Amino acid sequence: MIFLLSFLKGFFMRIIVDQTLCCGHAACVKICPENAISLIAGKATIDASKCTVDGLCIPACPHGAIEYDDDYAGGVGCGF
Ligand code: SF4
């Protein structure tokens, strides 16, 4: 059941990194239990295939560079 809820959350929500705010501090890399974040060219990059959207990395970032993508709906639009 938990896996199903996690899967559905990942389908309808996602986490994004504002590359302009990311300083490569890497606190997010250390806190991610899924090893979904890596530094590429000094910037945090999230592997969406690993991310469970638990949000642990959001408060870990000292610059507020990580957040939920409010505009993402898993590619499922409402039709308007
Ligand atoms: S939301 Fe959770 S699983 Fe996804 S990148 Fe952040 S810490 Fe890792």
Image (tube, rainbow, N blue to C red):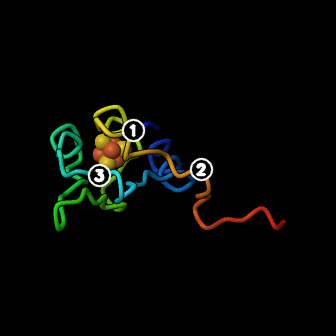
Residue 70: which numbered mark, if any?
2
Q: Mark 1 points at which residue?
A: 54
Please name which of the two marks, 2 or 3, marks the residue nearer to the observer.
3
Mark 3 surroundings: few (<14), some (14-19) or many (≥20) residues within 10 A:
some
Q: Does the residue labelled 1 lie within 8 Å of ligand 1?
A: yes
Q: How many marks?
A: 3
Q: In this view, does 43 lie above or below 27?
A: below
Quadrant occupied by the C terminus: bottom right
Label 3 secondary element: loop
| Mark found first going from the N terminus, 1 or 3 | 3
Label 1 secondary element: loop
Q: Mark 3 points at which residue?
A: 22
Q: Is residue 6 above or below residue 78?
A: above
Q: Is residue 2 above or below residue 29?
A: above
In contact (CB < 8 Å): disc 2 and disc 3: no
Give ligand 1's quarter of the image.
Answer: top left
Classify residue 48 by image quadrant: bottom left
Q: What residue type is labelled 1?
A: Asp
Whole-angstrom CA distance, mark 1 to mark 2, is 15 Å
Classify residue 56 by image quadrant: top left
Whole-angstrom CA distance, mark 1 to mark 3, is 19 Å
Q: Position of residue 79 (x, y in %)?
A: 82, 67
Mark 2 surroundings: few (<14), some (14-19) or many (≥20) residues within 10 A:
few
Q: What residue type is labelled 3?
A: Cys
Q: Which of 50 and 44 is in front in this view?
A: 44
Q: What residue type is labelled 2?
A: Asp
Q: Where is residue 67 in the image (x, y as percent from the top left)?
A: 45, 45
The residue at the point 42 percent across, 54 percent down is: 16
